[in-house]
Amino acid sequence: MMRTHGLLLILILFFSIACSRNATTPPEQGAEPIANESLAFDISAVNQQPQQWLATYTSNGKTAKFRIELGATKDSGDKIQQMSFGKGKFLREPGSEPEGFLIDLGKVLEATKVPKRVQKSDSLQFEYVILGRSQSRSREDSFADSPAGDWTVTKIFLGDDEGEVFFNFNPVVKKAEFSIKDSGYGNFVIAELSKVL
């Protein structure tokens, strides 16, 4: 009986130490998404008009780099559900090592394959809609108007609406993320992004 209690105490102590290590060890940059269905990366401003950022993501010592450009928007005119629409593009950045980013993003978007060979392009056009400006983030990783925050929430449309992905960004903390819209879009979004990464 004493041996059983002693063994139980050792196991409890072991698991307590393991849990406390996980709680206090900061994740490697890029290894931990902001939310379960999002992948976070760093952004730094390049241009103001049009808005352009250099995006970077490091995984296993390799850094993916690309630029994101958002053109001017036009309001929908709907006073009840106010949205703004615009066009943008992803731009290829020399020296990018995209493998880790594409694999990690593929997991988030529930893609079933990451293309190994793609025809590279200097840019990838898309359309986007702004779903919310000056958004704050809750502990549950949802966005809200009140209190006001520094996040802008958008949705990107790739191809002829063949792929959709949420793109949320916060220039104050220099962070952005891609979030899943629907798992059915995963393979297409990854294949398209592979062209410019």
Image: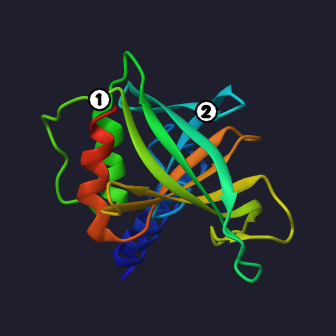
Q: Where is residue 77 drawn, in percent x and y?
A: 72, 72
Can you say which quadrant of the picture contains the N terminus? bottom left
Q: Residue at x 18, y 60 (%)?
A: 112
Residue 2 relative to residue 172: left or right = left
Q: Residues within 10 Å of mark 2 (few under 14, many from 20)?
A: many
Circles 2 and 1, Cβ within 8 Å, touching? The answer is: no
Give the secondary structure at mark 2: strand
Can you say which quadrant of the picture contains the C terminus? top left
Q: Residue at x 64, y 72 (%)?
A: 140
Q: Amino acid at mark 1?
A: Ser
Q: Residue at x 70, y 79 (%)?
A: 81
**Label disc, if present, on residue 77 of the rendered structure:** none
Task: Identify the residue position indicated by label 2 in the image.
Answer: 52
Q: Amino acid at mark 2?
A: Gln
Q: In which image quadrant can residue 172 be found?
A: top right
Q: Residue at x 55, y 44 (%)?
A: 25
Q: Residue furthest right?
A: 147
Task: Identify the residue position indicated by label 1 in the image.
Answer: 121
Considering depth in this image, is 56 or 119 the residue closer to the camera? 119
